[in-house]
Image (spheres, rainbow, N blue to C red):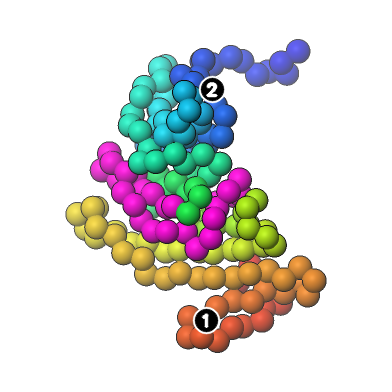
């Protein structure tokens, strides 16, 4: 029994170590593992899968989110953005990001934890603004917060060399 699930399509490659986002009303399947590469980028328009581009490097075990109407891929130590139909390097990640969640919250891109960096409690956020021509961007703020599970508190970097101990680790 499929409990209502229906087969929609066959993927263009085995979806191992890949991630998917909805971007411009299409599914974008990124990374994956085929013929030894994790650089694949396909989109599905509701009917067919189309090869869009290749990622700038092997970016398996990562995560993708749509933020400010652009696709962001976060994997290993790298952060790339798909803007104007090309991949652009945004920044080096603050730690090795592997098999972990990323999301957008309060107009910032958040990465949380990592399978490859103990104690797996890192939480960073990044705000990006783009210029009016939609091709140049700058990083306005980087916020760092590390949760301390034994204290049930977080240490937040205030950006001036001081830290705040927070009762609520989500702020």
- Callout 1: few (<14), some (14-19), or many (20+) C-alpha neighbours within 10 Å? few
- Residue 153 in sight in this render: yes
Relative height, residue 114 to residue 2 (above, below): below
Residue drawn at (53%, 44%) of the image: 62
Rendered location of residue 125, percent (x, y): 50, 64
In the displayed structure image, the side of residue 135 where residue 65 appears, left or right: right
Depth order, front residue of 61/6: 61
What is the magenta range?
Answer: 78-102
Q: Which residue is mark 1?
A: 158
Q: Residue at x 53, y 60 (%)?
A: 95
Residue 130 rendering spot, x and y as whole percentages: 29, 59
Instruction: Check disc 2 and report the residue beneath it.
Output: 14
Residue 36, compared with residue 88, is above or below; it is above
| Helix, strand or loop for disc 1 | loop
Res 107 seen here: no
- 35 to the left or right of 6: left
Decide which of tag 2 and tag 1 comes sooner along the chain.
Answer: 2
């Amino acid at each position: 029994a499929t409990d209502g699930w229906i087969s929609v399509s066959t993927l263009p490659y085995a979806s191992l170590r890949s991630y998917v986002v909805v971007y411009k009303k299409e599914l974008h399947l990124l990374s994956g593992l085929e013929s030894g590469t994790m650089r694949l980028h396909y989109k599905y328009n509701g009917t067919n899968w189309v090869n869009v581009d290749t990622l700038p490097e092997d970016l398996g075990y990562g995560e993708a989110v749509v933020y400010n109407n652009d696709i962001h891929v976060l994997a290993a130590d790298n952060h790339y953005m798909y803007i104007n139909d090309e991949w652009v390097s945004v920044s080096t990640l603050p730690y090795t990001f592997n098999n972990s969640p990323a999301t957008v919250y309060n107009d910032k891109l958040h990465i949380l934890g990592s399978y490859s960096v103990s104690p797996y409690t890192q939480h960073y956020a990044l705000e990006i603004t783009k210029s009016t021509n939609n091709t140049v961007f700058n990083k306005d703020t980087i916020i760092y917060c590390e949760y301390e599970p034994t204290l049930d508190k977080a240490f937040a970097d205030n950006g001036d060399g001081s830290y705040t101990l927070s009762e609520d680790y989500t702020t």
